[in-house]
Image: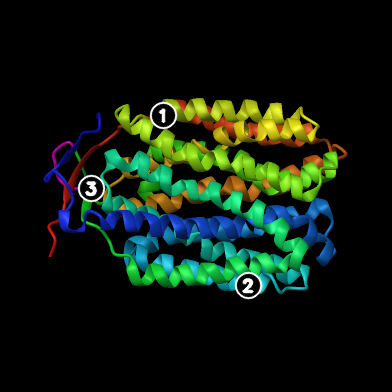
């Protein structure tokens, strides 16, 4: 059935309408900090490996462990978000992730460091579903393209901040300084979120053809919703390419082409910078075209696969600097489109669960790709093109999966609660 979006009121309660932008800012800032925490590994990985006596091919284990924790918390955190609310879970996420970031910055053992990375990922992963839950309660489905574009720009900005700041901090104070600094900021932001954030008035209720409300279980939401599964597969492929590049590109350029660490950081920062601006723009454009998500996502993922191959064929710093922004534009701009699809596919009471479960599937790409690329890089005697070709497989699979998605499958009624 074609999705029909209706509303019982023309706008959210006007006395608190401006507050929803505060909610968006705080959710965005919290997501930015967990993204900075995650992205710190890329520019610091070589130095951590040297400090802890970990060979290059084994560095992917740290990132894989982080994403294992991240996936586990997404799978369970989404359900918990629907039970205890987004505000509490964002607070727990930010304080926990920040505290263990600081612990990792002081570790002197590879084994302990790997374990701590898993704990950091576990706490950081809960932030995403909590943010989606809060934002979908303050903004209507037809507005979510631009909202999720702004929200997900945090992942790109996190990469930019990390790749500009971390090489400088390493040169000045060693690799642990960035983990201490970003961990402390994460803790403070978690406290602020707890004091300020509140749930919003917008409620979306999925109904069956007879009009009676549906209350699907979490398992049915994931396993019985064909479109949700396809979006999960598309995101898996996209994340395989995006976070595989973020995690490995610094080391690949440094070891594969002799690029200086600071220069490699600038290249990756340029890669991510286009995503910061591109995500809100593509979300806004999609909203204007009747909320289109499927076809734009296919186009972006296809371009992403092609640009990864092109980047793999390059071997000079000027060429990397030119190609990185173009690669970044396609590597990030599919994300707000697929994120904005989630509230359209399920009712409000299941948004947190659905967001967490789909993101857990997406992040499996992040779990598997570090080890896969490391193995290919080592097996091909540090062949740069082979590593980038391995990354390109992911978005190609994602593009095919999106072809089969019906982005307007169910009737969704959107209502706005009156203020108490």
- Look at the image and say whether residue 360 sits in the magenta stretch: no
* Mark 1 vs mark 3, CA separation in Å: 21 Å
Give the mark toward the camera: 2 or 1. Answer: 2
Q: Which residue is mark 2?
A: 102
Q: Which residue is mark 3?
A: 204
* Mark 2 vs mark 3, CA separation in Å: 40 Å
The local secondary structure at tag 1 comes to helix
* Mark 2 vs mark 1, CA separation in Å: 40 Å
Q: Is residue 84 left or right of residue 253?
A: left
- Quarter that holds the C terminus: bottom left
| Structural crowding at the residue carrying mark 3, measured as other residues with C-alpha within 10 Å and reported as few (<14), some (14–19) or many (≥20) | many
Q: Nearer the viewer, residue 199 or 221?
A: 199
Work out whether 208 lies above or below 261: above
Q: Earlier in the sequence, mark 2 or mark 1?
A: 2
Q: Nearer the viewer, residue 41 or 19?
A: 19
Locate residue 7, reporting x and y percent. Answer: 15, 42
Q: Which residue is mark 1?
A: 294
Q: Which mark is residue 81?
A: none
Q: Nearer the viewer, residue 349 or 18?
A: 18
Picture residue at 60% right of the left edge, 53% below the top: 161
The local secondary structure at tag 2 comes to helix
Q: Is residue 281 visible?
A: yes
Q: Earlier in the sequence, mark 1 or mark 3?
A: 3
Locate residue 128, reporting x and y percent. Answer: 45, 55
């Amino acid at each position: 059935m074609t999705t029909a979006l209706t509303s019982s009121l023309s706008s959210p309660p006007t006395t608190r309408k401006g507050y929803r932008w505060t909610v968006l800012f705080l959710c965005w800032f919290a997501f930015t900090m967990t993204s900075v925490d995650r992205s710190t590994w890329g520019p610091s990985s070589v130095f951590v490996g040297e400090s802890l006596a970990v060979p290059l091919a084994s560095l992917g284990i740290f990132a894989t462990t982080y994403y294992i924790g991240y996936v586990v918390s997404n799978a369970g955190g989404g359900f918990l978000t629907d039970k205890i609310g987004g505000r509490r879970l964002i607070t727990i996420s930010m304080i926990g992730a920040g505290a263990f970031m600081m612990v990792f910055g002081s570790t002197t053992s590879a084994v302990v460091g790997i374990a701590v990375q898993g704990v950091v990922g576990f706490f950081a992963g809960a932030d995403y579903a909590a943010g989606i839950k809060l934002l979908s309660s303050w903004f209507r489905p037809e507005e979510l393209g631009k909202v999720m574009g702004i929200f997900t720009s945090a992942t790109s900005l996190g990469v930019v901040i990390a790749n500009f700041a971390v090489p400088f901090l390493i040169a000045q104070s060693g690799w642990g300084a960035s983990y201490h600094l970003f961990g402390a900021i994460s803790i403070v932001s978690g406290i602020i979120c707890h004091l300020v954030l509140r749930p919003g008035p917008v409620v979306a209720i999925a109904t069956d053809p007879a009009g009676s409300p549906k209350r699907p279980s979490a398992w049915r939401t994931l396993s019985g919703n064909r479109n949700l599964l396809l979006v999960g597969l598309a995101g898996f492929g996209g994340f395989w390419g995006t976070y595989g590049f973020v995690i490995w590109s610094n080391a690949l350029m440094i070891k594969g082409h002799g690029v200086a660490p600071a220069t490699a950081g600038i290249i990756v920062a340029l890669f991510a910078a286009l995503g910061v601006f591109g995500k809100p723009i593509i979300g806004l454009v999609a909203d204007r075209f009747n909320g289109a998500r499927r076809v734009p996502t296919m186009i972006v993922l296809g371009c992403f696969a092609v640009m990864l191959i092109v980047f793999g064929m390059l071997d000079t710093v000027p060429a990397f600097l030119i190609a990185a922004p173009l690669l970044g534009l396609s590597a990030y701009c599919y994300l707000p489109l697929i994120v904005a699809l989630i509230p359209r596919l399920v009712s409000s009471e299941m948004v947190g669960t659905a967001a967490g479960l789909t993101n857990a599937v997406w992040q499996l790409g992040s779990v598997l790709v570090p080890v896969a690329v490391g193995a290919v890089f080592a097996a091909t005697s540090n062949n740069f093109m082979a590593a980038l070709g391995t990354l390109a497989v992911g978005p190609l699979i994602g593009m095919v999966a999106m072809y089969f998605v019906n982005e307007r499958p169910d009737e969704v009624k959107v209502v706005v609660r009156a203020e108490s």
